[in-house]
Amino acid sequence: MKADFFRGKRVLIMGLGRFGGGLDSARFAVQAGAAVTVTDMADAEDLSPVLKQMADLQGVTYHLGGHHSEDFCNCDAVIINPAVPPGSEYLQTARQAGVLLTSQIEIFLELCPARTVGITGANGKSTTTALTAHLLEAGRHEAGFRKVWLGGNIGDRPLLSELSCMTGDDIVVLELSSFQLEQLARSRQSPDIAVITNITPNHLDRHGTFEAYCDAKENIFRYQRLDAGEPSGSFFNAEDPITAAWFDRYRKQAGRACAKFHHADVGPAIAAAFGLPGNANLSNLAAAMAVARQLGIDDHVVEHSIGAFKGLEHRLEFVTRTRGVAWYNDSIATTPPSAIVALEAFDAPKIIIAGGYDKKLPFDDFGRKIAADAVAAILIGATAQKISAAIEAARTEERPRVLFAVDMQDAVLKAAEIAQPGCVVLMSPACASYDMFTNYRHRGDVFAACVRAMST
């Protein structure tokens, strides 16, 4: 695919998304000289914040509130939002009509002149992506990079519409979801440098089985170029049995530079300067450091720069301390394993607020962890009863207390009533947010607002 491929083409953007995932694709297609149509199942009212950001785009046609089969026949290419299941009947219509199916991440990797670092995992991928970009920026001159770019599945950061600003002397750090990696398999592409933080069951409502989810994640390594001529690499978490097994398999391939990382790889001086709690975050830092070393950045750069890294919103984010109780927002924890990691980050007595949309994931291990590690659990949302049953099945003593709340405000007030000085109240839901909130950010913002309102 060449840069002028879309000039004069009819391009359909499938899925604008409430996060604006299709916005970058639409802007790129317009800039490339395409005739652009945007289609989304949501209506204009639901998409109004994103549509306002598109007000400057001329000549875009919108078909909102549902898809129309004729749109998928009468176009030259469909740029597909990662949230769209590959088995969609509309995509089948496009295939039968001989229409090119592609995605933001496929186009980007094909056209990007810069080196790329891709990071995936069930837990910690956003923090690891941000940490990697932070370290590469700190050591940019040492490594010889003109500019460090951060994008992919992390936040609302455009990629395609910034391509014209990128050069071969730049490096791009990408968070890659299983949905995006599923798309990359279609064009047999992987990033130059690939990292996996860990792998535990997630998105089984989309992938169907854990094996299919693992298969999607493994695409980050499958198509890496082994003759790139520049420092490349494949990095695996030594503490995760599946990724450690992948390391043993991939390191046997000729031309592939493979390495494992472990939280103990972070030396005491760097660990002391690092502000995020828990061994899981040390593992994230170890992964970022492995990439930095591969690209020629010394550990002294890490030691001098890591104290400035403040973490990400909604990821074990400190909200406030009131009456001796510390409140943390971990709304990004949308799976039981990620919430278990959050519980393990603190040694203090813990009250957890959990529950939400049901992604059909098991709660047995989560229930055991709460029973062993928390003084109380306050449960909300569609999965509240399932989590409660998992706790009761694992209970060996009177604690933890299990309470139910009707909404986030009720949960925060109940937590405040029982929290003692020295406690941590952790909102780490172990579930998606869609039963009660627009998305995990909305949930985290509501939690933080309730906490601050309660503490004033």
Image: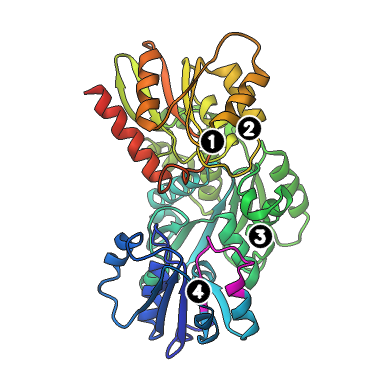
Q: Which residue is mark 4?
A: 79
The earlier-in-sequence mark between 2 and 4 is: 4
Q: Which residue is mark 1?
A: 430
Alpha carbons under labels 1 and 4: distance apart: 31 Å
Few, some or many C-alpha atoms within 10 Å of disc 2 (few <14, some 14-19, many ≥20)? many
Q: Amino acid at mark 1?
A: Ala
Is residue 163 visible from the viewing direction of this image?
no
Q: Is residue 48 above or below residue 142?
A: below
Please state which of the two labelled residues, at mark 3 or mark 2, is closer to the viewer. 2
Few, some or many C-alpha atoms within 10 Å of disc 4 (few <14, some 14-19, many ≥20)? many
Secondary element type, mark 2: loop
The x, y position of residue 128, in whole percent, is 50, 45
Question: Which numbered circle lies on residue 363?
Answer: 2
Please state which of the two labelled residues, at mark 1 or mark 3, is closer to the viewer. 1
Q: Amino acid at mark 2?
A: Phe
The x, y position of residue 440, in whole percent, is 43, 44
Alpha carbons under labels 2 and 4: distance apart: 36 Å
Q: Amino acid at mark 3?
A: Asn
Q: Which residues are magenta?
A: 78-91
The reply to whether dot 1 and dot 4 touch (C-beta < 8 Å) is no
The earlier-in-sequence mark between 3 and 4 is: 4
Question: Which numbered circle lies on residue 219?
Answer: 3
Alpha carbons under labels 1 and 3: distance apart: 25 Å
| Furthest-bottom residue in this view | 8
Residue 82 painted magenta = yes
Alpha carbons under labels 3 and 4: distance apart: 20 Å
The earlier-in-sequence mark between 3 and 2 is: 3
